[in-house]
Amino acid sequence: MEEKERILISACLVGDNCRYDGKNNLSSKIDDLLEKYELVPFCPECEGGLKTPRTPSERQGDKVITKDGRNVTRQFEKGAELAWNICFYLKIKTAILKENSPSCGVHKIHDGSFTNKLVDGMGTTAELLKEKGINVISEEEIDTLLK
C-alpha cells in the first residue's frame, strides 16, 4: 500500500473545538482530503500554551494582543515554531490553515482593532511556515489539492 502524503491542517478544520470561543470550523471537505492525504491536525494557539476558550487575539504589527490588552506574542510564536518542527520532522510540504486567524490566516487577518475588519496579511504560523518553504494554503483553497 502506497503511503499517503502528510498535510498539516488547522485542528479546528477537522472538528477539534479549539477556536478561541471553544467551537470549531469543521470543513465539509475533510472526508475528500482523507481519501488522498494523511492529515496531521495542529492548533498553534493551544500548543503555544493558550487555553480554550480564550480571549480573542489579533495581530498588531509584530505583536499579538488580546482584546483585553495582554501581549500573547510569545505563545503565538511558540505555536508557530512547534508547527514548523512537526513539518520538518514528518517531512510535510503543505499546510492547510484557517483563514483570518491571527495564527493561521494565509491571505487575510483581522486588522488589530477588534472591529471585525479584515486586511491583507498572514498569521504568525502561516508566515513562519511560508518562510520555511512550506506550501501554505487556506481552507478556501482545498479544492486545489483534490484535483
Image: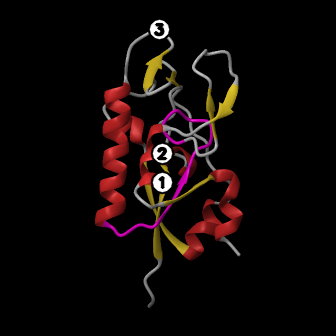
**Horizontal and vertical percent for residue 65?**
45, 18
Residue picked out by circle 1: 130
- Secondary structure at badge 3 equals loop
Tell me the magenta residue range. 90-104
Is 97 magenta? The answer is yes
The residue type indicated by label 3 comes to Asp
- Residue name at image x 59 percent, y 74 percent: 35
Relative to residue 35, is residue 141 drawn left or right? right
| Circle 1 crowding by C-alpha within 10 Å: few under 14, some 14–19, many from 20 | some
- Secondary structure at badge 1 equals helix
Of the numbered discs in the image, which one, if any, rests on residue 68? 3
As measured in the structure, the alpha-carbon distance from the residue carrying label 1 to the one carrying label 2 is 5 Å
Q: Earlier in the sequence, mark 3 or mark 2?
A: 3
| Circle 2 crowding by C-alpha within 10 Å: few under 14, some 14–19, many from 20 | some
Prevailing SS of the magenta stretch: loop
Is 127 magenta? The answer is no
- Secondary structure at badge 2 equals helix
